Amino acid sequence: MKGVYILLIKINKNVQETVGSLGKIKFNKGKYAYVGSAQNNLEKRVERHMSKNKKKFWHIDYLLDNKFTKIVDIFYKKSGKSEECRIASILSKTELPVLKFGCSDCNCKSHLFKIRNSDAILRLGLEEL
Ligand SMILES: [Zn+2]
């Protein structure tokens, strides 16, 4: 399957993490949503996000490597790649973007948001994986 996905991530403690080229970023504890897409084999991509001890490639790999960080829920939708940035732009209107995170190849504010209201995720109409 190809499409977009959202990882709902819980950070249990205020942490600081070096995120590749972005450098050190402070993350306050709370819930975050990461928007990504996989144009082939979304299942495998999600499996990769869940696995520990992997080579770091995406910004999200650095965050998920932190021991106080955990994926608590996953949502997905069959779609083309443009949907990924469309969803990120919707979330940027109501949630708190972690600037430039996950945006190495697009012009979004971010693809990672600190969630203020979980309804914002549910309203996007994705399905739970
Ligand atoms: Zn984008």
Image (cartoon, rainbow, N blue to C red):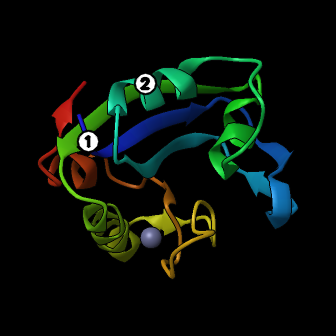
Q: Secondary structure at mark 1?
A: loop
Residue, x 43% and y 24% (percent of image)? 44
Residue, x 67% and y 33% (percent of image)? 64
The image shows residue 13, relative to residue 96, as above or below, that is: above
The image shows residue 95, relative to residue 10, as above or below, that is: below
Image mark count? 2
Q: Disc 2 and disc 1: Cα gap in Å?
A: 10 Å
Which residue type carries mark 1?
Answer: Lys
Badge 2 or badge 1: first in the primary sequence: 1
Residue 111 location, x and y as percent? 49, 61
Residue closer to the observer: 81 or 15: 81
Residue closer to the observer: 47 or 75: 47
For label 2, the residue is 44
The image shows residue 1, relative to residue 99, as above or below, that is: above
Q: Secondary structure at mark 2?
A: helix
Q: Is residue 77 left or right of residue 47?
A: left
Locate the C terminus by quadrant: top left
Q: Assess mark 2: CB under 8 A from ligand 1?
A: no
Residue closer to the observer: 105 or 29: 105
Q: Is residue 45 left or right of residue 121?
A: right
Quadrant in which residue 11 is drawn? top right
Residue 10 location, x and y as percent? 54, 32
Residue 16 tag number:
none
For label 1, the residue is 2
Residue 48 location, x and y as percent? 55, 25
- The quarter of the rendering in which ligand 1 is drawn is bottom left
